[in-house]
Amino acid sequence: MADLSQPGPSLTWDEFMKVELRVGRVISAEPFAQARKPAYVLHVDFGPELGTRKSSAQITALYTPEDLVGRLVVAVVNFPPKQIGPLMSECLVTGFHNEHGAVALCVPDHSVPLGTRLL
């Protein structure tokens, strides 16, 4: 596994632009009972162009399902779907590990339209 505490190799602007980071709103969140590590199943609305996508998110240390519904999140939407136990994950919700290893979500600090791409 990569050492995520160190900067990775440089990449070109064209390489960065291949990653579609978009804003979505969590419309539902429930415990993912079948996950190996504590996680939630999130349903995230990315607006009319992309629709709603599912994701498994290991964010249980800092958030309850009730905390998550209605929140804006930033997610990668152009990874291929990934099977995680019985769930087909369709996007990767982004976050940062804090000093205790818990994941804090990466979120816009103001409202932006659903589906907006990070540039």
Image (tube, rainbow, N blue to C red):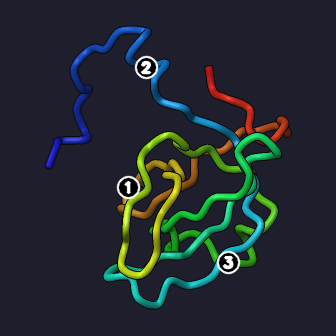
Above/below status of 118 relative to 45: above
Q: Earlier in the sequence, mark 2 or mark 3?
A: 2
Q: Residue at x 56, y 74 (%)?
A: 41
Residue identifier under label 1: 99
Distance from label 1 to label 2 (Cα)?
27 Å
Q: Position of residue 110 (x, y in %)?
A: 82, 37
Q: CA distance from mark 2 to mark 3?
A: 32 Å
Q: Decide: marks 1, 3 in contact (CB < 8 A)?
A: no
**The residue under label 2 is which amino acid type?**
Phe
Q: Position of residue 49 (x, y in %)?
A: 76, 40
Q: Is residue 35 left or right of residue 117?
A: left
- The residue identified by callout 3 is 65
Q: Disc 1 marks which amino acid?
A: Glu
Q: Is residue 55 above or below residue 87?
A: above
- Upstream in sequence: badge 1 or badge 2: 2
Separation of marks 1 and 3 at Cα, in angstroms: 22 Å
Q: Secondary structure at mark 3?
A: helix
**Pointers 1 and 2 in contact (C-beta within 8 Å):** no
Check disc 2 and report its element: helix, strand or loop: helix
- State whether residue 9 is above or below residue 114: above
Q: Nearer the viewer, residue 36 or 106?
A: 36
Question: Residue visible at 55% across and 43% down?
Answer: 77
Report helix, strand or loop for mark 1: loop
- Residue type, mark 3 in image: Pro
Q: Quadrant of the C terminus?
A: top right
Q: Which residue is mark 2?
A: 16
Side (left or right) of 89 relative to 50: left
